[in-house]
Structures are given as C-alpha cells and as structure tokens.
Image (cartoon, coloured by chain):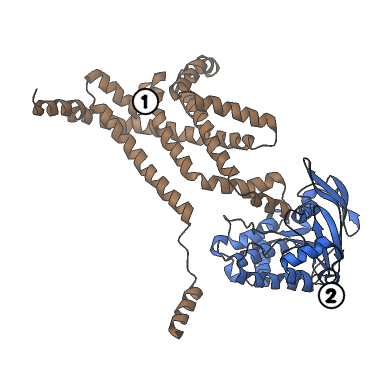
Amino acid sequence: MSEFASGTLTAKNIHLSFGSNHVLRGIDLHVEKGTTASVIGPSGSGKSTLLRVMNRLIEPAKGDILLDGRSVLKDNPDELRRRIGMVFQQFNLFPHKTVADNVSLALRKLRGMSKEQARSEALAQLDLVGLKHKADARPANLSGGQQQRVAIARALAMKPEVMFFDEATSALDPELVKGVLALMTDLAQGGMTMVVVTHEMGFSRNVSDTVTFMDGGLVVESGSPEQLFTEPRTERLKGFLSDVL
Amino acid sequence: MDLQEILKQLGETFLDWNAMGEVIPKMFAVGLPNTLVLAVTSGIIGTLIGMVLALMGISRNPVARWIARIYTDVLRGLPAVLTILVIGLGFGPIIRQLTGSTSPYPLAVAALALMSGAYIGEIFRSGIQSVDKGQLEATRALGFGYGASMRLVVVPQGIRRVLPALVNQFIALIKDSSLVFVLGVLASEREVFQIGKDLAATSGNLSPYVAAGLFYLVMTIPLTHFVNWLDRRLRTGRPEKKEPDEAAAVVGKGAQA
C-alpha cells in the first residue's frame, strides 16, 4: 500500500556533547515504518542536532541508531545517508546548478545512472512536486516555496527509506508555507517514514502519528498528538504550548 | 628656458617618434609574445599551485595547513624582484648541470608561478571558505563523502565567486613579468619592458619606456574592465530568461483587467 520502500527508525539513548555543552542527554525516538514523528520544542533544545546525529552528519558520543532493527553505527556513514533523505530550513539547493541538475547529481554520481536516465528520473521527481516546468531554471529564480519543493524532490530521488525535515517551512514567507506542508502531508499519507522537526503545531497535531517534545537535550514528553496537545502532563510542555499556540 | 623649450624637451624625451618607430616593431615581434608567454604559463602553473595550497589550507590535517601557511606567508612577504633573483640565480647552476641549458627563462616562469601561487592560494581559500556551510551539509546528507562534496559542490562555487580577484592577480602577473630583466635573458627571450629598457639605455631617451607602457596598458585596461563586468555579472546573475508561458500569462492578465 505504501508508495515508498519505507523503513523503521529507532534512536536509543543518544548522547552528544560539544565541549562542556551536553546537547543530547539520552534521547530515545522510535519511528515505525510508514509513520510520521514530529519533534517539537523550544530553540536550542537539540531537535535539529538529533536529526543530524540520526543520519550521522554528527557522530553520537553514546547510544545506538537502528534502521529496520539493525544497528547502522558500524556502516559507512555515506551509505547510511543515501537511505535517509534530509530537507533543510535554508533549502541548501546548489545555486550553480539548474533545478534538474540539483535533483540528478546524486543519481548520476552515487547511483551510477547515465545522464539521460538521471535527467528523466529527476524530471519525474520534479513532476511529483509540481515543478517539472522549472527543470532548467536556476534555484535563485524560484520562490522559497518552490526551492523547498525542489529540495524535497532532490531528497526523494534517492528513494530514501526515511525522510528528515529540519524546520522545512521556517524560512518561508507565510503564504508559501501551505504548499510545502501540503506536499509533506502527501508524503506522510503515501506511507513515507518521516521525522519532522517543526514549529508548525497544526502540522504536528493533524498529520503526525507521534509527537515528541524535547527541551534541554531531553525528551520531556512523547505520545500521540491527541495526548500531547490536549492533555500535556508536564509543566514544561504546558508552558511551551501556551507560548506557541 | 621658456615654456616652448621645456615642452620641446619633454616631447623629445618621452615622445621621440624615431625611437618609438624603432622599438615598437621589436616589441610586437619579440617583447609582446614573451610577456604573454611569461604571464600565461606562470599564471596557469600558479593557479594549479594555488589550488593545491587552498586545499591544504582548508584541510583537516594540521601539517598540511601549516605547510600552506608558511609557504604563503614567505612568498607573499618577499619583494617580487628578490624572489625572481634568488630563484633565477640560485637554481641556474643546478639546471645547467642537469639539462645543459643556460637559459634562465624557465626559472623566471617558475619564480613568477611560485609567487603568484601564494596569492592565488589565498584567493581560492577565501572563496571556498565563503561558501555557506549548508552546501557541504546538504551534499553530505545526500550520501557524498567529504572529498566528493568539496569537489562537486563547494569548490566550484568558491572558485566562481573569486574569478574577478583571479583576473586581478593575472593583471599583476603581467606587470610583474617585467622584473624578469634582472636575470639577463637572451635577446630573443626579452619581454616588453626589457626591450624598452635596452633601447632607452643606448639612446638616452625615455620614449621606448613610454612605448612599453602603452603595450602594458593595452593588455591590462581591457582586463580591468573585464573584471568589472565579471564582478557585476556574478553579483546580479545572468539576465533572466522569461519563459514564453510566463510572458503569455502576464499578457493574459493585462488583457483581462
């Protein structure tokens, strides 16, 4: 039923320090195959860092990361990242390449596709996000919302088993947020396993299957959106929700 | 001396047409090719040296960073004429023993290349380091290793934005190639400045220098304007190509209103 070859992602007891700054203090996160986990919390709570540890852009000091039940810490980190797509707040498209080349770069260099094959695959991915007609434009000539949709297409082109979204709509103008959230909702409903770090409480509440509230490098509360948004148990979550809602 | 005499004397010193007429064909035939060969070959080699230095300078290996740092500090800190003299005279005997060649010309190219490499290395390094960290992160997130990410995404962007500085460096190299005269190269290997200098010395007249100056200006002024154009182009981007359907959409809206 799923459109995607999704996987189950588990992080166990993740610790990380930058010098004396203990950024992650034993984080557990379990994302069942085909579900969406949103991670909420104040700035500096370690949400974005957690994403980067789970795809090993940053190596954890302690803990384990499992994909489909198997630890990936001994794997080549570059190969792990090919299985996990990531979308950034600042899009991070390659400004010197066309939209189509942004999407096809990894297909050619990492999947070994021919130029034509990679381009037709890239066009198919761009079609999915509604931007096939911009294939030969430069990222700078696209709106923020369009750029973020290209970034999503770029990540999806690698056929990832899990998708990470790091505040994907935070840098967008308000009127552009909706389109990107709609695309993310489509992916979630299509059966992609997703970890979404977000300040969009509406998305977190309505689309995600589980919500994790982090503060100070710890998971303070986690559960269903219903539980966290209607019956927060901790003072910290209550305080956070009253600030953002 | 009245004003007319002063003007006449200045005219004879700087604008002696006979002296110019004698020196200009020689500058075209011998000087200009040599200046261009010196500047272009040392520019190409210097760019390669600079690339290596830049990559060493941003390397995660501290030894590589140190070597690049020391090389750059020394060669940027020395006067060009000193470097050319020391390398040209110092390595001359060794080259002669190894190859039998007595021409200091290759050593002049080497000295200019080593020197410009130090400057170009700094230009490349600053360009590469000015690329947003998100670019490396996004490339690595796709599954590229550090080296491939630098090669495919970060370095090309870094180089692109320092192209104007690179052309400026090439202009400096054209001018610095005039210092090669201190090595006393063969008559057929002399560049624009030295040809002017030779004739100025025999005729006691400065017009050959003026002619040499004109040659340099003809080479450097277009490059300066090219830099300005390149700089503008890189900052504002290529003029955007409007797609026909977008133009049509605008027309359509206008027609409706």
- Are dots 2 and 1 on a single chain? no
Q: What color is chain A drawn in?
A: blue
Q: Residue at the location (34% across, 41% down)?
A: B221
Where is B108 relative to A17, above or below? above
| Quadrant of the frame with the C terminus of chain A | bottom right
Q: Quadrant of residue B6?
A: top left
Q: Residue at the location (57% across, 66% down)?
A: A143
Of the numbered discs in the image, which one, if any, rests on residue A1?
Answer: 2
Graded by Cα atoms within 10 Å as few (under 14), some (14 to 19) or many (20 or more), the crowding at tag 2 reads few
| Quadrant of the frame with the N terminus of chain A | bottom right
Q: Where is residue B1 in the image (x, y as percent from the top left)?
A: 9, 22
Assign a secondary structure to mark 1: loop
The chain under label 2 reads A
**Residue A232 appears left or right of B193:** right
Q: What color is chain B drawn in?
A: brown
Q: Residue at the location (21% across, 28% down)?
A: B14
The chain under label 1 reads B
Q: Is residue B192 visible?
A: yes
